[in-house]
């Protein structure tokens, strides 16, 4: 047992190393379908699918994508909520050896165009409600075929009618468009004479997904993840959470998120569990699903668990079903942890809310608190097969326990690299003296003598709003496009509901225009270009912005100024 892993004694029944199958994601799911064909794979608003039916749907989708010209090594852009169509298309692309670029379904047209160009995807899948955004985006991107799905595609007759009454009738009619193919039509085609798609040539170490995140510098980048990355992270998290065949998990985290895709979906499918697909997140929805679906496993952000601990409907619910709960994306306040655990205990359960840490460059979560331990402020110890250490920033020098430095990670969950950005990849993935490749996270932390890690701050500029990553440089870039903006700086400020909210400081070109009208105009300008979490909630006008010694806008000075006001 290596001496540099002092935390191993806290593992309990968790093995220090796992045996990863040399397969693709599709092959892993197909093995589950052969093993337990009649077990329920997913539950979507009370519609369910067995593993037998799921693999058959994936095979039909792969046939359809092949007929549209998709080949091994190509990319498909998937812009879907957590839903059957998005999941099926992901595995169908994987069967063909293609790579799925996963993006937020509420992305704006300029963001979609950027993702399409970055991924070079010729085919995309989204909902009919978002057709107009893709129609606008393809003016500047190489999109050839757009597959449109509808939420009612997988609803019962009663729920279809209910959806039409509440939301469906408000969706604009899609005009005649030769580039559009309808999901329902593609999946219904059963031409026996048509050629069947063959499994692609990709292997376990080849790319499987592109997830978009801020990179370790805070500038949005495509993160290239292999089949092995997703399988390893899923198996590690599943082992940590004692996931078993027949378990069920709420898939609250979306499929464009590493944990949502790698654990809530893929790990559950590999293990033979049921993924309860949650297309639209709200605390009320999660509370209802806890009461009615009785999942064993729940993963979410601190604000979710805070809301659940205060939900009146759960005060009388039976929560004995819960066996493991994990909180990530933001720091978990101890009062939130204690209130949630007390609620579960009072309602017949016995579960610890475990805090973890991760980043998309390692799929997502790669460490968490052991079930038997709690240390104030700690993000836990690494999962099996993952190594972590603290290095002096911008160096490969490891620091001793207690000293603050950059968190560095090594192991099978670490990404292949940044999409088409070898310079950023080389800066982030570095070979150390031990011969291993280490991921330099851009996060500052420390570890104690027992090997427990503690998050301190981010070197990279990033805001965490409601669990979503917001990149200030991206928001500033949009603000600078407005003709009235001379200078702009964006920071995150504390918010009781969102943890952090986006605030912008703007120097207008005409100081006399500063006021409520210009603030509304700038916020609306951002809303036309950015997803809602990235848009400023408030704008403060200044005559000048603070500068560093080398003349750059000093965002840290603004952040410190705001912190002093709290």
Image: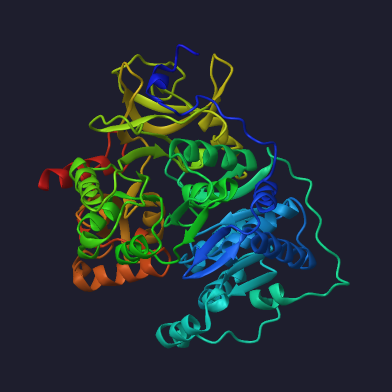
Query: Can residue 255 be seen in this snapshot?
Result: no
Q: Give residue 506's quadrant in the image.
A: bottom left
Residue 355, percent from left and from top = 33, 39
The furthest residue to the top: 3
Q: Nearer the viewer, residue 317 or 550?
A: 317
Coloring applied to the structure: rainbow
Where is 3 relative to 147, above or below? Answer: above
- The answer to whether 514 is drawn above or below residue 174 in the figure is above
Residue 224 can be seen in this image: yes
**Residue 391 sits in quarter:** top left
The residue sitting at 32% across, 66% down in the picture is 484
* Image-based side of 484 in relation to 27, left or right: left
Which is more toward the observer, 202 or 21? 21
- At which x and y percent is residue 280? 41, 67
Residue that lies at the very extreme toward the right in this rendered image:
193
The front one of 1 and 477 is 1
Q: Is residue 374 above or below residue 9?
A: below
Locate residue 52, reporting x and y percent.
67, 60
**Nearer to us in this view, 134 or 53:** 53
């Amino acid at each position: 047992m290596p001496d540099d892993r002092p935390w191993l004694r806290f593992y309990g029944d968790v093995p220090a190393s796992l045996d990863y199958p040399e397969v693709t994601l599709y092959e892993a799911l197909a093995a589950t379908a052969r093993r337990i064909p009649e077990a329920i794979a997913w539950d979507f608003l009370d519609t369910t699918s067995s593993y037998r039916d799921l693999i058959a749907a994936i095979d039909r989708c792969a046939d359809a994508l092949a007929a549209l010209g998709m080949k091994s090594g190509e990319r498909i852009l998937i812009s879907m909520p957590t839903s059957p169509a998005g999941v099926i298309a992901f595995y169908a692309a994987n069967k063909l050896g293609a790579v799925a670029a996963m993006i937020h379904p509420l992305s704006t047209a300029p963001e979609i165009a950027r993702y399409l160009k970055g991924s070079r995807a010729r085919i995309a899948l989204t909902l009919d409600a978002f057709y107009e955004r893709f129609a606008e985006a393809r003016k500047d991107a190489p999109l050839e075929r757009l597959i449109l799905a509808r939420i009612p595609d997988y609803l019962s007759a009663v729920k279809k009618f209910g959806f039409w009454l509440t939301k469906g009738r408000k969706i604009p009619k899609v005009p005649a468009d030769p580039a559009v193919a309808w999901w329902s039509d593609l999946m219904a085609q059963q031409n026996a004479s048509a050629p069947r798609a063959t499994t692609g040539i990709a292997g376990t170490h080849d790319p499987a997904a592109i997830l978009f995140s801020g990179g370790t510098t805070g500038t949005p980048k495509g993160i290239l993840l292999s089949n092995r990355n997703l399988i390893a992270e899923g198996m590690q998290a599943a082992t940590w959470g004692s996931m078993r065949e027949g378990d069920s998990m709420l898939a609250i985290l979306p499929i464009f998120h590493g944990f949502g895709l790698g654990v809530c979906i893929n790990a559950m499918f590999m293990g033979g569990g049921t993924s309860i697909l949650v297309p639209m997140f709200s605390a009320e929805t999660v509370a209802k699903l806890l009461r009615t679906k009785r999942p064993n496993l729940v993963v979410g952000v601190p604000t979710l668990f805070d809301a659940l601990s205060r939900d009146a409907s759960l005060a009388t619910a039976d929560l004995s079903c819960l066996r493991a709960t994990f909180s990530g994306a933001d720091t978990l306040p101890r009062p939130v942890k204690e209130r949630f655990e007390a609620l579960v205990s009072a309602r017949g359960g016995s579960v610890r809310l475990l805090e973890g840490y991760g980043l998309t460059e390692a799929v997502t979560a790669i460490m968490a608190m052991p079930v038997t331990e709690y240390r104030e402020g700690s993000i836990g110890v690494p999962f099996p097969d993952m190594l972590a250490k603290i290095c002096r920033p911008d160096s490969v020098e490891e620091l001793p326990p207690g000293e603050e430095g950059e968190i560095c990670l090594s192991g099978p969950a670490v990404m292949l690299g940044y999409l088409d950005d070898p310079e950023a990849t080389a800066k982030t993935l570095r070979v150390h003296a031990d011969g291993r490749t280490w991921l330099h996270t851009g996060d500052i932390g420390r570890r104690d003598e027992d090997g427990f890690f503690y998050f301190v701050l981010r070197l990279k500029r990033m805001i965490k709003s409601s669990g979503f990553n917001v990149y200030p440089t991206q928001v500033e870039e949009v603000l600078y496009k407005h003709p009235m903006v001379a200078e702009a700086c964006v920071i995150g400020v504390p918010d009781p509901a969102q943890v952090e909210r986006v605030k912008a400081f703007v120097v207008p070109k005409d100081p006399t225009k500063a006021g409520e009208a210009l603030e509304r105009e700038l916020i609306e300008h951002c809303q036309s270009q950015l997803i809602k979490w990235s848009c400023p909630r408030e704008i403060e006008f200044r005559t000048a912005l603070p500068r560093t010694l080398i003349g750059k806008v000093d965002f840290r000075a603004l952040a410190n100024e705001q912190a002093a006001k709290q």
